[in-house]
Image (tube, coloured by chain):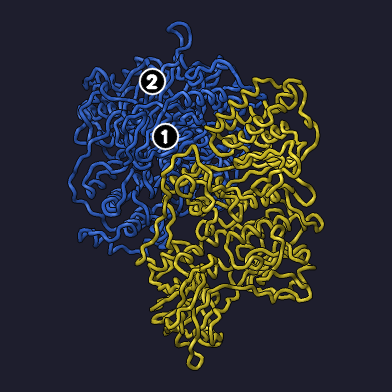
């Protein structure tokens, strides 16, 4: 995939030295040949080897710089004896050789120290830094020996070359918000919960929230999986946040707020993306006005995610942490196109983080919104949550539209059918149970395995326990109403027919297997789309083919300069952590944009972050050495179904301290350092 | 239970035990430089790397729980090589100043360097100039520091100050004060204790002696009721017997026990007076004619026995308000609980996951209890509810809920607690009736403790499995102490709580279990024994007869753990003892410690002689000091009475509470402990008392005029000021600690 001169990356052994151009072997990996649009890379060196893109690379200096990055420039923590002293010795000896003062004994000492670091260091960074150095010393021994023999500096010792390094970890890389996961777990392990929280908040302000309702893609990239089971990463995030809240501290921010820059940004929407953008912009000394259409702050996490999954008092703590930095929130204010135009004059930049709040149709016959009993998932959840969390009652006319006689959602005696398969539909069916529905069905086109993959095992299992009936391989064919009141749903049944040609299996309708369900409500929760009425038409903002705002996915600026977009309205309905990750990056770009006269730039750290994400840091085939396998993952206690079924008590009680510490101790601190020379 | 092998020997591990726990229990050696039993593993030294048979690579013994069936190898050539390399790295550029380093002779780096036979420095790294920091009582030399992290761990996890941090930066890493330029802490000095090298050192001790010149005297700390174990390190200076002997420093078994700064730095309170025969004659006469002896609880059990014997012999009265309050509390408690002793101790407190503290400014009243609570909070995630009229900033990172109640309303608060904490229990009819007839509205209004606060408390405790109620000395000296004690016993009995009672003095509990005390009527013709009197026998300056201070005596005390603890003579005293007076008056015993074996068995004491008492922690951390008092069953028959009308404290109220590290007239005389005797109050107190920062005020306390400078303290809230009593000599009265006073402004 990558054209390399030499590579030992991930155990490959490619050496194109002295080979004719057409005989060159390519690396099997997606290595960062091109550093950025202006510069191609000379070399890439990291935890699992080294790759040279240029035959002229001074390998002795490259090795020295990598050791230096570890020792001097990087955030090498110095928290274990082999790493602390070993790292220093590596660098000093490498540099001694590179500047032409080394001895052969230094080479032996380098190897000796490397071995001790590899076998005894506390974290992977200390264990892996020697790896590419040993590779270079082995494959380019002559270059090292020449420096020693001739007592001369290496060939480009004094030349100016850019060396850009970044510390990462498989979990951090896989997390859309790139949270310093080993850092916050270390804080738990060391019982330094304030440090744990600040580690999280470096890139993720919603610690309470993402300690509860994150689908944790990081856990799929946890190296511990290669040994036994992944760390319960998400649940450990709560501890820092709970420590701050339980002891009534102020807010532990990851850095001191910078002095006021005099710049102003408008943010549309106070959901996870809006909050995140505001948080990091405010930290940079930029004033933020956050406009929220609803009377309450927090977006879908507030009005979508139910109380039993995400207690509002905890989410409010996350929101208060943002407010604490001086962010100004303006509620009950839907942004209009006219306001957007005005924002361009009043603010230095605008961020659209309005989410996707239109429930898509299920595409069945007679699907008319005016039929009573047909109730979009977003509005349904709004009504439930606004009442349960904020005591906001349902207005009379809305009650009537939805066949209610109370000022809250009471489904006593009713049959509810939800069509979906994602988190939103799970929230709908479980809220329906809590609202007293007699019968709750979930209709899903595919099977049990897929619904679990699209949500979580816990979510599905808990819904079943609470009495939701899942109808798999089913779809609504038609709504049957009487005088615009929903009566019955015609359901088609499908089966999965394997493609004889080995392609993807097809869902095929089973003839004669149709059946009816008498239903009071049909709640479509198949997907949501964005409402872009707020965008001035004359701006002609570019859209994706799936109807979201188009950006390049790196700087999050739309086709209109100064207008940025992040979260679901950019990506489509996705996770909280995805919105946070996008908004964090967007905030960083916006901060420079408003301060540097409208220039769009990425930092070296961000460029490296994107390179590594593309390469993927996690290697599921890697064999783990130095850790005892067979230590089981801790599971947190869950409220008994009879206790939780008819109320909003938080279902997942979180870890006990003992569990949390045991789980934190399983973390292998898989920090790595990668470096590009260009 | 996990079965596995270490070096082929079959061993088992309990849940939560790591490989090193099991190895040490089984006497199998694994070297460490950073391991500290009482904290979570620092995992920085990597020396405890071990092999697992059949597996590539090493695993760390300190933080790895074993799995079923593995065989751990603790020693092999490869391990030896890597461990030796680690020691070589530790020694890179370590200053060769062992000749003057205070740690030399007891330095882990020295020991391990020798053990691994590292004779020369093979690896080189650039040296760096590093500045020695002076943090008051503590000096820090980063060039000696090996970054083991024991100090930061202990400061955060056991002490609770969380005042030390690591400045990360690879080779340049160092220990720094957390969020501050200077070390801002309670100066417990535990960081010095745990430091394996000479990086953290007592500034007072530095360069004054070599460790091998000092003799160690195991003793019990005299300053508060925790009864912490310590070792006085004593040296005879000078070349002949005319030279003086003095305490150079205090150390503690930091692996298992913890000491506060008063114990560590406040050791020089010994009485240097010489023998005065004339004074002795007068003292004997005074006692023989006295109507009563008033004494403090800063005495040994044996002295209490002598006083008791004198009472019987001479028919005089014994006054000790502090111990008498304790007796009242414990007797009333026992009448409901049926046991003479309360159920908790510091170990069980450490293991708790729910704690209520009421009636004490506990962090400064008894640092030992504070450390146990810190341990519980950090390690068990304990929910800690602190109930008091004054919030305490020192406890912020331990306490999860502060419940403020009105001064004087402790009885009402306990009644509300009983009502909240006792649910679904089968009470006797009378007990149930008591609970049912409580006037919640009245109690809530007068105590100012809201229903929502009690609900939050209940919610916090929902998942807890081990709860402790800590009762402080505000309660012991309360007018309604007996009924409060009955309520406490009721909560213990039905609320699934253990109870820990924390009195003021080192031997309040012991004295209360021994002496037959009378009501102090403040009459004349009283001999004071380390207490106010018409004739004063004391170890403090200005006594009519000088006697030995606590660190100059042997004898025993009873700590809050209900443990009889021996203490020994650190420094000799040439004068007279209470036993000499008793002998002169016909109460015979050759030595004071002859009384040890006669301590009353009905109170739980055992017939064990002083010389048969242990005074150490075993190598595995078992507390082998003295013995734990036997449980004693007593007759039940007490019942909580109706809650009396709750008092109101209006006007300028002060709370008698000492600053960090100060406890009494003895700590007040020590050299190193800070002597801050100002009156501290919040802005609202200042407004109510019409005082401003820096005002000199006077008021009457215990019959005498006290002069103080008032200081505004922004960390305080409410209208109660903190008033120290440690510097008032013998004029400290063990009454209810809140008091309404009339301030007189003095000219500045």
Of A531 and B329, the residue lying toward us = A531
* Crowdedness near tag 1: few (<14), some (14–19) or many (≥20) residues, C-alpha within 10 Å: few
Q: List the single residue furthest toward the left.
A: B635
Q: Which residue is mark 2?
A: B217
The quarter of the picture where the C terminus of chain A appears is top right
Element assignment for label 1: loop
Q: Residue A148 appears at what percent x and percent y?
A: 72, 22
Residue contact between numbered discs 1 and 2, judged by CB atoms under 8 Å:
no
* Chain A, colour shown: yellow
Q: Residue B358 appears at what percent x and percent y?
A: 39, 49
Describe residue B318's horizontal placement relative to residue B98 as left or right: left
Residue A382 visible? The answer is no
Of B50 and A332, the residue lying toward us = B50
Q: Could you say which chain is coloured blue in the image?
A: B
Q: Which residue is mark 1?
A: B54
> Given the image, what chain letter belongs to the residue carrying mark 1?
B
Cα gap from disc 1 to disc 2, whole angstroms: 49 Å
- Disc 1 or disc 2, which is closer to the eye? 1
Q: Residue B201 appears at what percent x and percent y?
A: 54, 25
Q: List the single residue furthest toward the right.
A: A597
């Amino acid at each position: 995939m990558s054209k390399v001169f030499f590579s030992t990356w991930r155990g490959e052994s490619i050496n194109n030295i002295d080979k004719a151009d057409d005989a060159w072997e390519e690396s099997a990996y997606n290595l960062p040949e091109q550093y950025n649009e202006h510069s191609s890379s000379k070399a890439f060196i990291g935890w699992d080897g080294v790759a040279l893109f240029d035959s002229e690379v001074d390998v002795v200096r490259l090795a020295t710089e990598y050791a230096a990055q570890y020792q001097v420039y990087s955030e090498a923590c110095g928290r274990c004896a082999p790493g602390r002293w070993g790292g220093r010795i590596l660098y000093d000896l490498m540099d001694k050789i590179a500047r032409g003062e080394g001895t052969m004994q230094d080479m032996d000492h380098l190897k000796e120290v490397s071995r001790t670091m590899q076998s005894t260091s506390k974290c992977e960074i200390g264990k892996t830094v020697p790896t590419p150095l040993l590779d270079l010393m082995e494959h380019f021994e002559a270059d090292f020996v020449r420096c020693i023999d001739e007592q001369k500096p290496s060939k480009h010792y004094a030349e100016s070359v850019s060396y850009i390094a970044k510390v990462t970890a498989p979990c951090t890389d896989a997390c859309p918000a790139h949270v310093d996961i080993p850092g916050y777990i270390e804080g738990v392990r060391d019982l330094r919960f304030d440090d744990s929280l600040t580690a999280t908040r470096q890139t993720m302000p919603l610690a309470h929230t993402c300690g509860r309702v994150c689908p944790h893609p990081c856990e799929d990239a946890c190296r511990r999986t290669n040994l036994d089971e992944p760390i319960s990463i998400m649940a450990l995030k709560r501890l820092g946040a709970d420590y701050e809240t339980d002891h009534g501290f102020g807010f532990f921010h990851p850095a001191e707020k910078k002095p006021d820059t005099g710049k102003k940004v408008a943010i549309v929407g106070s959901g996870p993306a809006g909050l995140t953008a505001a948080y990091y912009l405010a930290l940079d000394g930029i004033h933020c006005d956050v406009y929220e259409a609803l009377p309450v702050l927090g977006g879908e996490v507030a009005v979508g995610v139910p109380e039993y999954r995400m207690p509002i008092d905890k989410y409010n703590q996350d929101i208060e942490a943002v407010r604490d930095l001086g962010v100004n929130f303006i509620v009950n204010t839907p942004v209009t196109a006219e306001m957007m135009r005005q924002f361009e004059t009043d603010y230095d930049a605008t961020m659209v983080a309005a989410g996707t709040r239109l429930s898509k149709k299920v595409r069945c016959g007679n699907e008319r919104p005016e039929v009573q009993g047909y109730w979009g998932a977003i509005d349904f959840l709004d009504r439930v949550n606004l009442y349960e969390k904020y005591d906001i009652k349902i207005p009379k006319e809305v009650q009537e539209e939805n066949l209610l006689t109370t000022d809250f959602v009471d489904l006593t005696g009713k049959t509810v059918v939800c069509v979906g398969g994602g988190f939103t539909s799970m929230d709908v069916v479980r809220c329906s149970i809590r609202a007293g529905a007699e019968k709750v069905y979930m209709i899903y086109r595919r099977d049990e395995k897929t619904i679990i993959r699209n949500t979580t095992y816990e979510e599905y299992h808990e819904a079943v326990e609470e009495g939701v009936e899942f109808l798999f391989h089913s779809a609504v064919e038609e709504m049957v109403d009487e005088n615009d009141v929903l009566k019955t749903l015609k359901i088609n049944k499908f089966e999965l027919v394997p493609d004889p040609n080995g392609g993807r299996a097809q869902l095929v309708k089973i003839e004669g297997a149709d059946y009816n369900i008498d239903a009071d409500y049909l709640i479509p929760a198949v997907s949501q789309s964005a409402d872009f009425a707020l965008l001035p038409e004359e701006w002609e903002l570019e859209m994706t083919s799936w109807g979201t705002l188009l950006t390049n996915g790196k700087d999050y600026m739309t086709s209109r300069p100064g207008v940025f977009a992040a979260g679901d309205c950019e990506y489509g309905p996705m996770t909280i952590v995805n919105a946070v990750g996008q908004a964090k990056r967007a905030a960083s770009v916006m901060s420079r944009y408003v301060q540097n006269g409208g220039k769009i730039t990425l930092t070296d750290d961000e460029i490296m972050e994107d390179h590594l994400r593309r390469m993927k840091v996690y290697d599921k085939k890697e064999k783990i050495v130095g850790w005892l396998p067979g230590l089981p993952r801790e599971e947190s206690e869950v409220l008994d179904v009879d206790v939780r079924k008819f109320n909003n008590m938080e279902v997942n009680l979180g870890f006990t301290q003992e569990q949390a510490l045991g789980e934190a101790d399983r973390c292998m601190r898989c920090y790595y350092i990668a470096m590009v020379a260009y | 239970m996990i079965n596995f092998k270490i070096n082929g020997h079959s061993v088992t591990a309990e849940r939560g035990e790591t490989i090193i726990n099991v190895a040490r229990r089984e006497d199998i050696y694994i070297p460490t430089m950073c391991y500290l039993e009482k904290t979570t593993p620092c995992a920085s030294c990597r020396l405890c790397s071990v092999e697992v048979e059949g597996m590539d690579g090493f695993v760390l013994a300190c933080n790895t729980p074993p799995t079923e069936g593995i065989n751990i190898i603790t020693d092999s050539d490869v391990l030896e090589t890597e461990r030796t390399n680690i020691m070589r790295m530790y020694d890179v550029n370590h200053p060769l100043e062992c000749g003057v380093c205070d740690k030399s002779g007891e330095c882990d780096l020295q020991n391990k360097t020798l053990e691994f036979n590292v004779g020369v420095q093979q690896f080189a790294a650039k040296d760096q100039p590093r500045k020695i920091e002076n943090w008051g009582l503590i000096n820090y030399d980063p060039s000696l520091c090996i970054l083991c992290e024991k100090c930061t761990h202990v400061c955060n996890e056991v002490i609770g100050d969380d005042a030390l941090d690591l400045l990360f930066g690879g080779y340049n890493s160092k220990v720094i004060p957390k969020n501050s330029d200077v070390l801002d802490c309670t100066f417990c000095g535990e960081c010095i204790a745990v430091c394996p090298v000479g990086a953290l050192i007592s500034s007072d001790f530095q360069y004054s002696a070599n460790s091998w010149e000092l003799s160690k005297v195991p003793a019990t700390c005299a300053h508060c009721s925790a009864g912490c174990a310590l070792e006085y390190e004593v040296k005879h200076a000078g070349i002949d017997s005319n030279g003086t002997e003095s305490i150079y420093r205090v150390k503690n078994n930091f692996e298992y026990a913890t000491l506060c700064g008063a114990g560590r730095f406040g050791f020089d309170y010994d009485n240097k007076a010489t023998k005065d025969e004339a004074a002795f004659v007068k003292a004997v006469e005074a006692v023989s004619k006295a109507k009563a002896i008033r004494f403090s609880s800063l005495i040994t059990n044996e002295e209490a026995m002598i006083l008791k014997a004198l009472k019987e012999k001479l028919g005089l009265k014994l006054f000790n308000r502090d111990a008498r309050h304790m007796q009242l509390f414990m007797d009333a408690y026992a009448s409901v609980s049926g046991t003479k002793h309360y159920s908790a101790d510091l170990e069980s407190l450490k293991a708790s996951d729910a704690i209520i503290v009421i009636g004490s400014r506990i962090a400064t009243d008894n640092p030992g209890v504070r450390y146990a609570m810190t341990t519980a909070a950090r390690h068990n995630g304990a929910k800690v509810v602190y109930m008091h009229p004054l919030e305490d900033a020192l406890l912020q990172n331990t306490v999860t809920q502060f419940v403020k109640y009105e001064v004087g309303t402790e009885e009402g608060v306990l009644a509300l607690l009983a009502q909240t904490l006792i649910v679904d229990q089968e009470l006797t009819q009378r007990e149930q009736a008591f609970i049912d007839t409580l006037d919640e509205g009245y109690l809530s209004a007068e105590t100012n403790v809201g229903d929502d606060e009690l609900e939050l408390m209940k919610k916090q405790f929902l998942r807890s499995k081990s709860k402790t109620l800590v009762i402080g000395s505000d309660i012991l000296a309360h007018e309604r102490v007996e009924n409060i004690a009955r309520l406490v016993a009721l909560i213990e009995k039905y609320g699934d709580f253990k109870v820990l009672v924390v009195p003021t003095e080192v031997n309040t509990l012991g004295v209360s279990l021994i002496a037959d005390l009378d009501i102090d009527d403040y009459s004349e013709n009283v001999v004071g024994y380390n207490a106010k009197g018409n004739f004063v026998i004391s170890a403090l300056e200005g006594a009519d007869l000088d006697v030995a201070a606590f660190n100059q005596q042997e004898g025993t005390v009873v700590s809050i753990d209900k443990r009889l603890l021996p203490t020994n003579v650190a420094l000799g005293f040439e004068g007279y003892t209470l036993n000499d007076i008793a002998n002169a008056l016909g109460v015979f015993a050759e030595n004071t410690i002859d009384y040890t074996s006669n301590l009353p068995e009905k109170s739980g004491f055992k017939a064990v002689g002083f010389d048969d008492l242990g005074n150490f922690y075993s190598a595995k951390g078992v507390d082998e000091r003295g013995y734990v008092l036997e449980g004693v069953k007593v007759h039940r028959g007490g019942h909580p009475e109706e809650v009396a009308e709750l008092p109101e404290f209006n006007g300028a109220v002060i709370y008698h509470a000492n600053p960090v590290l100060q406890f009494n007239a003895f700590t007040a005389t020590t050299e190193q402990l800070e002597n801050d005797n100002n009156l501290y109050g919040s802005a609202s107190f200042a407004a109510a008392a019409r005082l401003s920062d820096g005002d000199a005020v006077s008021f009457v306390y215990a019959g005498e005029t006290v002069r103080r400078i008032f200081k505004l303290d922004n960390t305080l809230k409410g209208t109660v000021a903190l008033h120290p009593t440690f510097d008032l000599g013998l004029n400290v009265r063990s009454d209810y600690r809140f008091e309404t006073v009339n301030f007189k402004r003095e000219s500045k």
